[in-house]
């Protein structure tokens, strides 16, 4: 009987996060079905343009955003002809942010704080809107949360694989949107202040991420 009670106590946060994630998906699907607006039309034009290479378009005057979201949007349009398919990566990433922010909150400030963060992420009007918007904002956020989780795991366990994941996700975040650099800089400064013994693998991971991003810089 005590074991059963302990299992229930462990399971209830997962149940709450699952419910929040499903609610978040339902709210985001409503936004997903609306008409394309503004910069989304630029996304649609880039991924549907048969006469130009996607990488040439995003490194030219047509766009000032890195290529990752456009590449994923192009892949998602392979599922059909609906123009809303360019929003699919944003929808998946925006929904994934809900359990991810819970996990981040749980590992930093506690279970209840993580659940509150997940609830706020679920109901945030900005997250609902941008999860149904064919641009890379929610994808960048999901990658940054994942980068932070990997950084914390690396500093806690010392395992190389987590530093590799940290560097890879950080690089992908910048490949999604240049403003990710501001978050990554603040993240690294926090690490130097709070987890000083981890500065060396973190620095190596960031150098690796910078080298992987170099081809994008050379194309611009």
Image (cartoon, grey):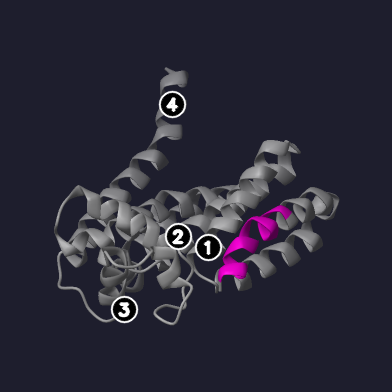
Q: Are marks 3 and 2 in contact (CB under 8 Å)?
A: no
The residue under the point 60% across, 50% down is 168
The residue under the point 29% across, 46% down is 19
Say the numbered circle drawn on residue 175.
1
Which residue lies most toward the front here? 51
Q: What residue span does the magenta drawing correspond to?
A: 208-219
Residue designated by label 4: 7
Image check: 175 left or right of 1? right
Residue 43 image position (x, y, % from top left) = 31, 70
Say if 127 sits above or below 94 in the image. Answer: below
- Quarter of the figure that contains the N terminus: top left
Report the Cα–Cα distance between label 2 and label 4. 41 Å
User: Which sits earlier in the primary sequence, circle 3 or circle 2?
Assistant: 3
Of badges 4 and 3, nearer the viewer stands 3
Report the Cα–Cα distance between label 4 and label 1. 41 Å
Instruction: Determine whether the residue tagged by mark 2 lies in a helix, strand or loop.
Output: helix
Residue designated by label 2: 68
State the residue in front, 67 or 148.
67
Say if 28 sits above or below 168 in the image. Answer: below
Report the Cα–Cα distance between label 1 and label 3. 18 Å
Label 1 Cα crowd, 10 Å radius (few <14 / some 14-19 / many 20+): many
User: Which sits earlier in the primary sequence, circle 4 or circle 3?
Assistant: 4
């Amino acid at each position: 009987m005590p074991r059963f009670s302990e299992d229930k106590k462990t399971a209830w946060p997962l149940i709450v996060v699952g419910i929040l994630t499903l609610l978040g998906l339902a709210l985001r699907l409503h936004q997903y079905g609306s008409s394309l607006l503004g910069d989304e039309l630029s996304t649609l034009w880039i991924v549907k343009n048969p006469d130009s290479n996607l990488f040439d378009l995003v490194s030219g005057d047509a766009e000032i955003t890195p290529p990752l979201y456009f590449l994923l949007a192009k892949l998602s349009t392979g599922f059909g002809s609906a123009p809303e398919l360019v929003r699919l990566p944003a929808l998946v990433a925006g929904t994934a942010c809900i359990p991810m922010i819970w996990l981040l909150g749980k590992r930093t400030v506690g279970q209840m704080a993580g659940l509150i963060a997940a609830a706020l992420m679920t109901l945030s009007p900005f997250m609902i809107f941008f999860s149904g918007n064919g641009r890379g904002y929610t994808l960048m956020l999901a990658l940054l949360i994942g980068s932070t989780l990997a950084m914390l795991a690396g500093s806690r366990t010392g395992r190389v694989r987590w530093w590799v994941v940290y560097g890879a996700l950080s690089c992908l975040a910048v490949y999604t949107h240049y403003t990710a650099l501001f978050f990554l800089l603040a993240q690294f400064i926090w690490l130097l202040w709070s987890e000083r013994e981890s500065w060396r693998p973190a620095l190596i991971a960031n150098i690796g991420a910078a080298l992987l991003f170099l081809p994008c810089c050379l194309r611009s």
